[in-house]
Image (spheres, grey):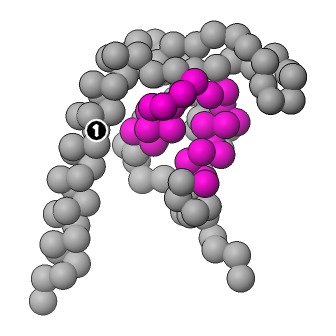
Amino acid sequence: MPREKTALLQGTLDMLILKALDREAKHGYSVARTIEQATDDVLSVDEGSLYPALHRMERKKWIESSWGLSENNRRAKFYEVTNMGRKQLSVETSEWTRYSHAIEQMLHTP
């Protein structure tokens, strides 16, 4: 029985994109697939959210882009994390860890 995909919590998309790009440059579709695969298809990112986020993050200088060829030999824009983006990923990861720990505590409070 296939699992239903979960909508992303507000504020997590940037962190997930930065994490997906942390090791190598990827084009948009590959970023979305990386997030889906890493979360066992629980989380998904639709194009209507992904590309505006990528463009916003590029304006903030957290990522940069260049044109290249995809694995299908099609022209695609590849994104990679900048040093500013790595710092932002660290900040957001710390905040998310603190937040999720607080929720975990609440769920286990009698």
Decide if residue 89 is on the left or right side of residue 75.
Answer: left
Residue shown at 70%/75% (left/top)? Answer: 2
Q: Amino acid at mark 1?
A: Glu
**Residue that extends furthest to the left in the rendered view of this protein:** 110
State the image coordinates of residue 73 (x, y, percent, origin top left): 87, 22
- What span is colored magenta in the figure? 15-37
State the image coordinates of residue 39 (x, y, percent, origin top left): 53, 58
- Crowding at mark 1 (Cα within 10 Å: few <14, some 14-19, many 20+): some
Q: Quadrant of the C terminus?
A: bottom left
Q: Main secondary structure of the magenta part?
A: helix
Instruction: Please say whether residue 24 is one of the residues in the magenta stretch.
Output: yes
Question: Could you tell me which secondary element the residue under label 1 belongs to?
Answer: helix
State the image coordinates of residue 33 (x, y, percent, origin top left): 65, 46
Relative depth, front residue between 43 and 8: 43
Decide if residue 2 is on the left or right side of residue 81.
Answer: right
Residue 27 location, quadrant: top right
- Position of 66 relative to 107 (above/below): above
**Residue that extends furthest to the front in the rendered view of this protein:** 23
Q: Quadrant of the N terminus?
A: bottom right
Residue 3 location, quadrant: bottom right
Q: According to the image, label 1 marks what residue?
A: 92
Relative depth, front residue between 81 and 99: 81
Relative depth, front residue between 77 and 110: 77
- Position of 66 relative to 109 (above/below): above
